[in-house]
Image: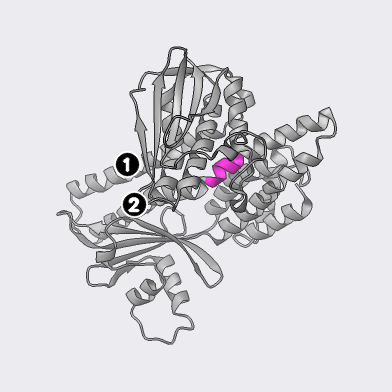
Amino acid sequence: MKKEIYNSILKKISKAAPLFAKSVLEKAVSARGHTQESISAAEMLKILSNEVGPKLAKDKTQSNSILLSGAALIITNDCEEVVYKNAQGEVLLSELRSGNGIAQNDFEVFSEKGIVEKIQDCYQIKVRVISLQDKVYNVSISPNFNSAGVITGTVSVVQDITLQREIEDEVVSYMKNLKEEVIRRTSSEKELKESQELILQSSRMASLGEMASGIAHEINNPLAMIGLNIELLYRFLDKKRLTDDILKDKLAKIVEAGERINNIIIGMKRLTRPTDELDFETFLVRDIIHNVLNICSERFKLANINLTLIGDFENIKIKGRDTEIGQILVNILNNAHDEIENKYPMPWVEIEVYEEQFHVVIAVTDCGPGIPKDIENKMFDPFFTTKLHRGGTGLGLGFSRKIAESHKGTIIINKESPNTRIEVKLPKV
C-alpha cells in the first residue's frame, strides 16, 4: 500500500482516538507480518474491521449508549412529542439547535432534519442517510406498537457514520486503482501470477463492499432493538413496575436480536475465509444460500426488491468450496440488484434450485427483459462492465465463471427465459 494512502487512513481513525489510534493500527499491521508498504488493501480492510474498530470502540468511553454503538436514541409519542432521548440524542439536539434562532420544540427540530416522523407517516421501518453540517448519519425510524398493535409513537436510531464513510472511501478508491496496476504488471509470467492474485482479492472485496450498507443496517436494527428493550427494562425497574412477564418478554426479544446478529456474522465469516485453506467438501446447497441471504437480503429490502426462493432443495448437496460458491451467488445477486433498482414499479428477484440428470442448477432470475445481444457475448470477459459510472470493475462474472469451471461446472445465460436469468450448473454428488 502506498505510504500516502496508509497515512491518510491513519489520520482519519485518529479523529476517533487521537491518543492511541496510531499505536493500535501499527501493532495490528506488524502482528500480521506487514509494513506500511507491504500491506494490501484487502488486508487493511480486514484489520480495520476485525481489530482496529473493535479496539477503539472498547477503549472509548461512551456512557448511556446502545451497547457502546454511540448511537442517538430518540422516542416520540402520538402527540408529536419527544418523550425520551439518550445522552447522544441530547448532544445531537444541541448541535441542531446551535445557530438556529427559530423557536421550535424538540420534535420540530428533529423532524425538520428527517430524524423523526409523525406516526401517520411511519407505518414501517424507514432508513435514510442524511448529511448535517460536516457529518453523515445513518437514520433508522421504526413504529412503536402497544400491546394492542396500535402505533403509539416512533423510535429513531441515529448513527454517526462520517468516519466510517471516509475510511471506506479511502480504501475503496485505492482498490479501484488495482485494475490499472494489474494491466501494467502482466509483462512476465511472474508478474501475471501476481496480477491474478490482485484480481481475485479485488473481486471478492468489491462484491462484499457493494453489500456493506445492507449489512450495516442489518446489524444496526437488532442492535437498536436490544438497546431499546434494555432502556425499557430500566424504566420499568425505576417505576417498580417490572413483572416476570415483562422481564421474560423483553429478554426474549434481546436474545432473538442477538441470534440475528450472530447469524449475520457467521455468514460473513464463511464467505470471507481464504479459499486456499479449504479443500473440496460435500455440503448442503441450502446452507450456502442462507449464508448469502444473511448478508445481502437487507440490501434488497432497502431497495424494495422482492427476493424469493423457489424449489424444494432442503437435501440437495454439491461438492466443492462453499466459500467460492457463495461468492458466485453474491456476484450474480449484486448484478441483478444493480440492473433493476429504481427501474420497475414492483421489482423482483428469484433464486431457484433444482436437479438435472447430472447437475444441480442454481438459477437467479430478475424482472429485467433479458441481456441485450450486443452485451451478451461480452458478459464474462475480464474488465467488461455496464456499471463503470457506479464503480464496476468488470471482475465479478468472469471471476465467477472461473470458479464454476474449477468445480467442473459452468455459468450460462438462459436465452429462452423472458426475463434475465443466470444459471450456475454444478456436478451432482
Residue 79 percent across, percent down from the top left: 22, 72
What is the three-letter code of the residue carrying label 1? Glu
Residue drawn at (23%, 44%), measured in percent from left and top? Answer: 248
The residue labelled by disc 1 is: 256
Q: Pointer 2: what residue?
A: 225
For mark 1, give the secondary structure.
Answer: helix
Q: Which residues are magenta?
A: 205-210
- Say which quarter of the image contains residue 7: bottom right
Q: Position of residue 226 (x, y in %)?
A: 35, 50
Which of disc 1 and disc 2 is earlier in sequence? 2
- The correct choice, above or below, for 240 with respect to 419 in the image is below
Seen as rendered, the residue at the extreme left is 148
Circle 2/circle 1 CB separation < 8 Å: no
Dominant SS of magenta comes to helix
Identify the image's colour scheme: rainbow, by chain, secondary structure or one colour: one colour
x 36%, y 72%: residue = 111
Circle 2 SS class: helix
Q: Residue pushed farthest right?
A: 188
- Cα separation between marks 2 and 1: 10 Å
